[in-house]
Image (cartoon, rainbow, N blue to C red):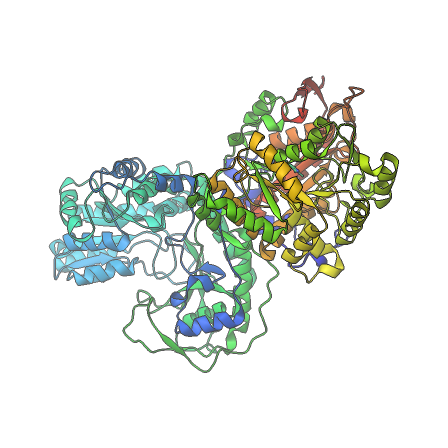
Amino acid sequence: MIKHDLHELDFSSCEHENLSKAKESLGSSCWSAMSTLSQDNVLAEPYKLKIVQPTQRVADAVRRQALKRAFYNVYLLPSEHVYVDLLTETGTGAMSDRQWAGLMIGDEAYAGSKNFFRLQRATQEVLGLEFVVPTHNGRGAEHLVANIKVKAGNYVATNWGSPSAIEHFKRAGAEVYDISGSYELHENFDFKGNVDVERLEALIHEVGPDRVSFAHVKLCVGPLGSHPASLANLKSLRDLTGRHHIPLVLDLSYAAENAWFVREREQGHSNKTVASIVKKIANLADVAILNCREACYANVGALIATNDATFHQEVRALVVVFEGLFTYGGLNGRDMEAIAVGLYEMVDENNLRWNLTLLRKLSKLLQGYGLPVVLPEGANGVYVDVKALLGEAGPNDHPARALAAFLYATTGVRVGVHDQLFNGCQHELLAVLVPKRCYTALHVEYAAEALRYAAKNAKSIRGLRSISPQAHFLDARFSIVGTLPRYVRFYAETVPEPYRAKAVEPIATNSREFREKAIKEAGYNTFLLRSEDVYIDLLTDSGTSAMSDYQWAGVMQGDERVGSPNFKTLQDAVQEVLGYRYVVPTHQGRAGEHILSQSLIRKGQFVPMNMYFTTTREHIEMAGGTYVDVIIDEAKNPESRHPFKGNVDLKKLRRVIEEKGEDQIAYVSIAPEVNMAAGQPFSISNIKQVSKICHDRGILLIYDATRCAENAWLIKDREPRYHNTSVKEILKEMMSYSDGCTMSGKKDCLGNIGGFIGINSRRLYERFCRMVSIYEGTRYDGGMSGRDMEALARGVYEMIDDEYIGSRVRQVQYLGKLLLDAKVPIVEPVGGFAVCLDAKRFLPHIPQDEFPAQMLAAQLYVNSGVRSMERGVVSAGRDHKTGRHKYPQLELVRLTIPRRVYTSSHMDVVARSVMDLHNQRATIGGLKMIYEPPQLRFFSARFEPMEGH
Ligand code: P71
């Protein structure tokens, strides 16, 4: 859990929820054997976020108004007014990157689309069924099946799993007969989804098999929540229907979850794969329906699959009437492709395990808060028994709906309702349905807090009255009995990420043996690993951000012609957000450094900096300049808790200028959030003075603005005068003290590539432009594509969103806090983009010329697949004059957190692994360098362990 307010964090004394809390809530089974991370103990999402969709907090007044306009029916609320949306997980989850890629290879042919054949193959491989007809969604499939299979006046026996199916059966003239098991809501039984086979048998005896059109069973849904059926139960159902030649229609939308529970709870299946159990279940069916919105992470579509050639012909004949052609069934080619990919993901056990882990976490939290949760936990959500919660004192009229309305109005969390209106459900349930791969542990914690709050304040809810008696539950309208009760404003301790996942990218786990081999082959250099062999990649935050959906929309709007408007968007963004007059695009940061250094430095000149950065110094030196360090001494002491260790030592700065002479100073180069000092910020009061010193002497002050927004946030957090100032304003002020900047667009600006120079002087602008046209591209693109400029421009606006940047930095601080609590030596205070392990204190027995940080990074990878970066003696390189290693004071391993990519659960895994290494630190030895390139050696140097290790 991340505290709302960082001011509350006092690292020395604060008692903070740490890993043991996380461990508790995730269930201890996940935490065993952590030292060798493998697929069997996934603790965090088995994916990273790839596209995020920002969510807005919604003001109280807006929510109340929205609820009124929605006639107190949460299903009628506009989603943009919902903060955390747990209304339904059907069609609302995040597609994988491969599914999104599938959209791009949609073959929009009318007949015989490529994507249909891929879909057919996936159906055969995953379900083991030969024939498939797609339909536009579940209702489309149910409609066709009802139309073909129902004989008017006959019975359809169903477990009441799908309200829309029942509607279709009735419309086709069937008498609907309930064969759902008769379990109590709170009965503790593993398979409350079991079908009442005896009841079906009784029906067959009573009316004769000819009068039963078919049996219809939807797995893992129903009036009690989302409970599975045992394989034995399904088999006996199959035996019965088979004996009487009654077709069995199985809705397999939750077959994978059902299979998971079969393996977990039913004897004799513990060594089977989910995929094999799914196939087994599917093969019990004469007709299978699959709602792809529920089953396979798709936003649209369903399938009818069968081995029955005659039935298949019938479906093909009818699909053209209601849906489309048999090779597209009312779907885009691209959606068929996304479904085909999704079918394989449906039986992916890493995904399933995590989805269910998150649900279990939610259930445990709610139970801990004393809410009456339906147990055992089911497949698609957590159900809260509102009658038990509110008791006699609660309202009689639609209590669950009233509670859902109150929950939304007060907290912005929306949940579903299962009641009489929903499928004639006899209970009053809040259905907390978590969209798959979309929300994180923090969202779930927030929702749990919201539910606790609503439950506590619900006593005074008076209920809702229906004003639309015949309406479907989605459209029903209500008036409120009395008024919404007065309430104490909701305050959550948990601050969830201000976005949800819209696309995810699977990440690999592998064995320790595999990683030992991989790091050896990489010469113990994490730069030389293949990313596909990395589990959690904390090498860098550079170019690794997840872009927002809005940025991706910008990618689509890239204009690749000469004179692209995308440059103008970028120029406007830089001028508006950073305040520079002129903008010179460059393909990334170091290109700007090249141009700047070559344009401003005369051989023999000096560049004072607040610590060096590798590429920046390289370019200064290549231009014949010399870097002079003017950062405060505290920056080099990892134990100093100075809040602004990025500050310039003004005395040092004045001295350099005096000693060298003003005209020997090419410019002063200052970096916000100093990279090599573990992300330490400077303060406004310091930079103001630096600016004055420079400008009094006619010296240019140029920023390396790479992480300027994070610095601004840290100013807001740590510099008392700025607590109530927005990041946007702080940043504008910060930048106003300089004359220009280079910028790597790959960090704070949320681009995957790109950069620019901002400059106020017209003369310098022209000079830079001449260089750009030689080395980069034109002055209107800097070698970037139109789409990248557009995405970057949009990122520049997004980086100054206080919610976003706060959440970003809090995540970093959270990891730091976990490590500090465990007494792991890290650089303090924790900066805004990385947590740095202090290798000198971590491995005091390894001398610096045996590269302790390099080895620590290698061992972290071996331990858990987490990739980090050495920032010590290897990165510092050699002294050009003496040829000897430069021995930097800081010997660090940087755990760099990409933006909007990983979750707090990933941070828990990282922390756990570092602690593990710390416990066994005495066994770790040093390295010797066996290959060294001439420049920026850290990228490609190779090492091997010292003898004896
Ligand atoms: C980082 C990077 C990327 C990197 C660069 C060199 C070695 C290892 C990793 C890049 C920066 C940066 C600062 C403060 C300029 C650049 C170059 N950082 N200034 O931290 O942090 O920008 O990568 O866009 O060319 O992993 P560029």
In what quadrant of the picture does the C terminus appear?
Answer: top right
Is 180 above or below relative to 465?
Answer: above
Asked whether residue 47 appears in the rendered view, the answer is no
150 or 502, which lies in front?
A: 502
Give the left or right position of residue 118, taking residue 804 as reference: left
Task: Name the spot of residue 503 as percent of width and height, x first.
Answer: 45, 45
Q: Is residue 15 above or below residue 659?
A: below
- Rendering coords of residue 649 (x, y %): 83, 44
Q: Position of residue 551 (x, y in %)?
A: 48, 47
Q: Nearer the viewer, residue 332 or 798?
A: 798
Q: Quadrant of the N terminus?
A: bottom right
**Is the residue 153 above or below the residue 624 in the image?**
below
Q: Reply above or below: 569 against 119.
A: below
Ligand 1 in which quarter: top right
Tell me what residue is drawn at x 71 percent, y 28 percent: 623
Q: Is residue 757 left or right of residue 547?
A: right
User: Closer to the camera, 229 or 857?
Assistant: 857
Q: Is residue 420 visible?
A: yes
Which residue corresponds to the image point at 72% horizontal and 24% vertical from the top-left?
Answer: 926
Of residue 691 and residue 679, the one placed in the foreground of this image is 691
Residue 283 rendering spot, x and y as whole percentages: 26, 41
